[in-house]
Amino acid sequence: MIHKRNFLSRIESESFLIGILCLIGLIPCPKPVKKRGKPYYYSPTVMLRCFIVRIWLRIPSNNALHHYFYIDNAYNRKVMKACGLDRLPDRRTFDRRFKLISFDTKARIDAMGLLFINK
């Protein structure tokens, strides 16, 4: 069975990373569990995109990722916009939210694989 792999041609961006971040927005997000307290300002999809940036660019720590987004140049602003960030989160936000990403990663990876194969 031959799968068509033409989804790469649909990425309309000057950067492959920004294209991947846009495709991650198409993945259905699991329903958040109702919890007590203040709701999250940044959605799980936004945090997943930031985590992908950290992996893609081989950024070693959350502190370094925060510093990367803090650097003011055109490409970094495009990456922040592709992640869905309108302002820079605190470094501790990355620490806390990246711990939670590991719980729903398996379901998202399965959905990403199916999405990439079907496109």
Image: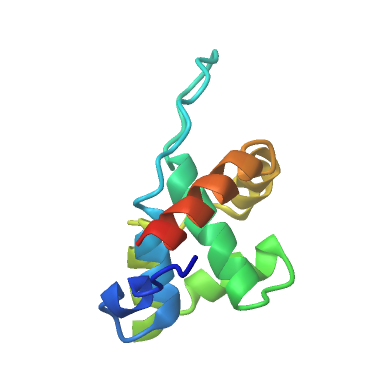
From this view, report whether residue 41 is shown above or below residue 57: above
Residue 30 position, x and y percent, is: 48, 32
Residue drawn at the location 44% of the way across and 50% of the way down: 46
From this view, report whether residue 19 is shown above or below residue 93: below
Residue 44 position, x and y percent, is: 49, 41
Look at the image and tell me in which quarter the C terminus lies.
bottom left
Residue in the foreground of this view, choosing between 30 and 69: 30
How many numbered markers are drawn? Answer: 0
Residue in the foreground of this view, choosing between 38 and 78: 78
Residue drawn at the location 42% of the way across and 37% of the way down: 41
Residue 88 position, x and y percent, is: 45, 58
Residue drawn at the location 60% of the way across and 78% of the way down: 57
Asked whether the viewer can see residue 79, the reply is: no
Question: Coloured how?
Answer: rainbow
Asked whether the viewer can see residue 63, the reply is: yes
Residue in the foreground of this view, choosing between 100 and 38: 100
Residue 114 position, x and y percent, is: 48, 52
Residue at the far right in the pictured view: 60
Residue drawn at the location 61% of the way across and 68% of the way down: 54
Residue in the foreground of this view, choosing between 41 and 115: 115
Residue at the far front in the pictured view: 1
The quarter of the displayed image where residue 103 is located:
top right
